[in-house]
Amino acid sequence: MAEAHKAVSGTWATRWTFILAATGSAVGLGNIWKFPYITGEYGGGAFVLVYLACIAVVGIPIMMSEVLIGRHARRNPINAMGDLAVESGSTRAWSLVGWMGVLAGFLILSFYSVIAGWALNYTADIGMGLFNGVNAKQTGEMFGDLTSNPGRLIFWHSLFMILTAIIIARGIHKGLENSVRIMMPALFVLLLVMVGYSITSTDKFGEGLKFLFAFDFSKLTGEAILVAMGHAFFTLSLGMGAIMTYGAYMPKQASIGGTVLTIAVLDTLVALVAGMAIFPIVFANGLEAGAGPGLLFVSLPQAFGSMAGGQIFGTIFFLLVSIAALSSAISLIEPAVAYIVQQHNVSRLTATICFSLIVWLLGLGTVFSFNIWSEVKLFDKNFFDLLDFLTANIMLPLGGLLISIFAGWILKRSVVLNELAMQNLVRFNTWRAAARVLSPLAVLVIFVTTLYKAFS
């Protein structure tokens, strides 16, 4: 195991670099539109309290588990799970959990890249003034024109994958570190700029704050708690090996508990601030707050097209969305690249090119799902819907469940104590109880509930 504990690809320069990278992995398209909406829909501030409790019970313990496994093994998720299982007296079959995580990230990136390409397209279109003065019907038609045109989708999908590959190919320090040091501060600044725009250009900022933060405990139904639990798991990029891989590059002296807590707080803050930026614009233009992805690609472009300064700030907004998507994308492909580089001594450039091409080719299935293959279905789902269902409803929850069980029950207590470095045994035992019982039970509830809804 001596070789297994060697950091083959180096370590992050500082603890804050890891925080920025992991926050970048966690912050994605869902933070921009989904979390603000479900917060307002399920009780505002009351929902936020429940969500934070779910983060504490579900998200943080599993994220700590992924980070400690990655840092102790200093390997990619496949080898990390297999090597540490053997070291702990268990079976190397645990490496299958690593394989599932790497594959899940791979599949997710193939369709995530296509959707992120839409954001790049809108950044360019709004910047050129194509949405100035358009009405709701026209924005809907423009979105339909985009998704029905395979050539346009392939162009933006290709551009996004090239940007992702360039960052990954440059390695830990020149690629990942340098990119997150630029992208994440830029994302925070752009978010604040958008909040300032919402305050000064609309008279609905107070209404937006009320939608997000007013305590309405009557909306805290069982469904609301399940939604909070599910989002607490998915928002932190758990179960796909990304956090485990980033943990393998984490400096030994950095506190895992404090670092993970910081990441969870930043991820939540980004989502809430995004809501503060979006919903005043939504309400000022009489738009539907619960429009989901349609809010992002149909309703908001219309709003920006009709507002003073909308062309500039619409461009800034979709640049923000693109940065959030790119920061997540690099974490989705890194586990697969790390495995090939470490296991087969292939150059990072070669591994990146090969995997990026495979992801790009697989992404064509998603491209065609919106046009020429829209009627081709398996289990009543097109290619895109099938991949989304397989990864979000089966692979990620199952991966998170098994990772939590592995850290709580399989890893030696001495290994976990050493990595977490918790001097206070009460805090350690609290984490251990969560990792062993509470987190697995919560993820199991998410897993069973989503499958029940899907097949009922």
Image: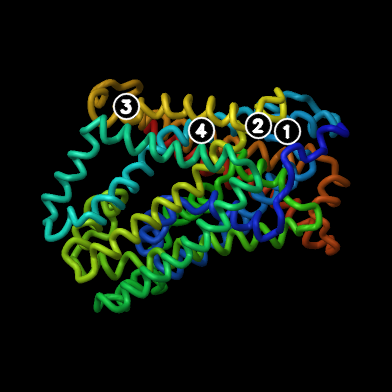
Q: Where is residue 322 in the image (x, y as percent from the top left)?
A: 40, 51
> What residue sits right under mark 3 in the picture?
382
422 and 13: which is toward the camera: 13
Q: Distance between the residues labelled 2 and 1?
A: 6 Å
Label pair 4/3, CB-CB below 8 angstroms: no
Mark 2 vs 1, N-terminal side: 1
Q: Is residue 362 above or below residue 2?
A: above
Tell me if mark 1 has few (under 14), some (14-19) or many (20+) residues whose alpha carbon lies within 10 angstroms of its own: many
Q: Label 1 is placed on what type of residue?
A: Met
Residue drawn at (88%, 46%) of the image:
414
Q: In which quarter of the image is residue 155?
A: top left
Q: Distance between the residues labelled 1 and 4?
A: 19 Å
Label pair 3/1, CB-CB below 8 angstroms: no
**What number is the disc on residue 81?**
1
Q: Label 2 is placed on what type of residue?
A: Gly
Q: Distance between the residues labelled 4 and 3?
A: 17 Å
**What number is the disc on residue 448?**
none
Label pair 2/1, CB-CB below 8 angstroms: yes
Q: Distance between the residues labelled 2 and 4?
A: 15 Å
Mark 3 vs 2, N-terminal side: 2
Mark 1 vs 4, N-terminal side: 1
> What residue sits right under mark 4 in the picture?
394
Indicate the colouring scheme: rainbow
Mark 3 vs 1, N-terminal side: 1
347 and 443: which is toward the camera: 347
Residue drawn at (47%, 29%) of the image:
359
Q: Label 3 is placed on what type of residue?
A: Asn
At mark 1, the secondary structure is: helix
